[in-house]
Image (cartoon, helix red, strand yellow):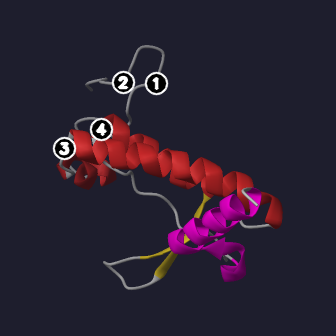
Amino acid sequence: MANLNPPGLPPDPFADDPSDPAGVLDSVEPGIPLDLAERLAVEEDLADLAVYESLLAPEGVRGLVVMCDDCNEDHYHDWDMLRANLQQLLVDGTVRPHEPAVDPRPEDYVTWDYCRGYADGQARRGRR
């Protein structure tokens, strides 16, 4: 049995097993590193996310809702998950699969557009 795990971890019980259930995961293509423009856009999103969370989390907003192009359903992302996804994009150009929110309350989530508008409104209000 081949142990490809880092030192200190137990051997993989499915190593060399042709029916390894994780075998389908091995076929996932590695991410393509972001180009400079993409990297800057993700860094801007991370900075915006920090602002949005600081403004909206105290108001009870848990994160963002995003319409998924693949399944045409809303996906609910907490602030921490969004931050982790964006950071992962910076590291290797991919977003790892994640479990969907369990019984999310749609009223606790807002869109990116709502966040932008709210932040702009707060900034204008502060300049008066």
Q: Is residue 110 above or below residue 80?
A: below
Q: Which label sits in the foreground, 1 or 3? A: 3
What element does badge 2 sit on? loop
82 in the magenta segment: no
What element does badge 1 sit on? loop
Residue assigned mark 4: 92
Q: Answer with mark 3 or mark 2, whichever residue precedes in sequence.
A: 2
Disc 2 to disc 1: CB gap under 8 Å = yes
Viewer-proximal residue among 126 and 113 = 126
Tell me the distance, in whole angstroms, between the alpha carbons under discs 2 and 1.
8 Å
Residue assigned mark 3: 32
Q: Which label sits in the foreground, 3 or 2? A: 3
Q: Is residue 66 left or right of residue 49?
A: left
Tell me the distance, in whole angstroms, between the alpha carbons under discs 1 and 4.
27 Å
Name the residue furthest top: 7
Viewer-proximal residue among 38 and 63 = 38
* Residue span colored magenta: 105-126
Residue type at tag 1? Pro
Residue type at tag 4? Asp
116 in the magenta segment: yes
Would you say residue 17 is visible in this rendering?
Answer: no
- Specify the label residue 5 is tagged with: 2
**Residue 126, image x, y percentages:** 75, 57
The majority secondary structure of the magenta stretch comes to: helix
Q: Answer with mark 2 or mark 1, whichever residue precedes in sequence.
A: 2
- Mark 3 Cα within 10 Å, few/some/many (few <14, many 20+)? few
- Specify the label residue 10 is tagged with: 1
Tell me the distance, in whole angstroms, between the alpha carbons under discs 1 and 3.
31 Å
**Residue 108, image x, y percentages:** 71, 74
Viewer-proximal residue among 70 and 107 = 107
Would you say residue 60 is visible in this rendering?
Answer: yes
Q: How many marks overall?
A: 4
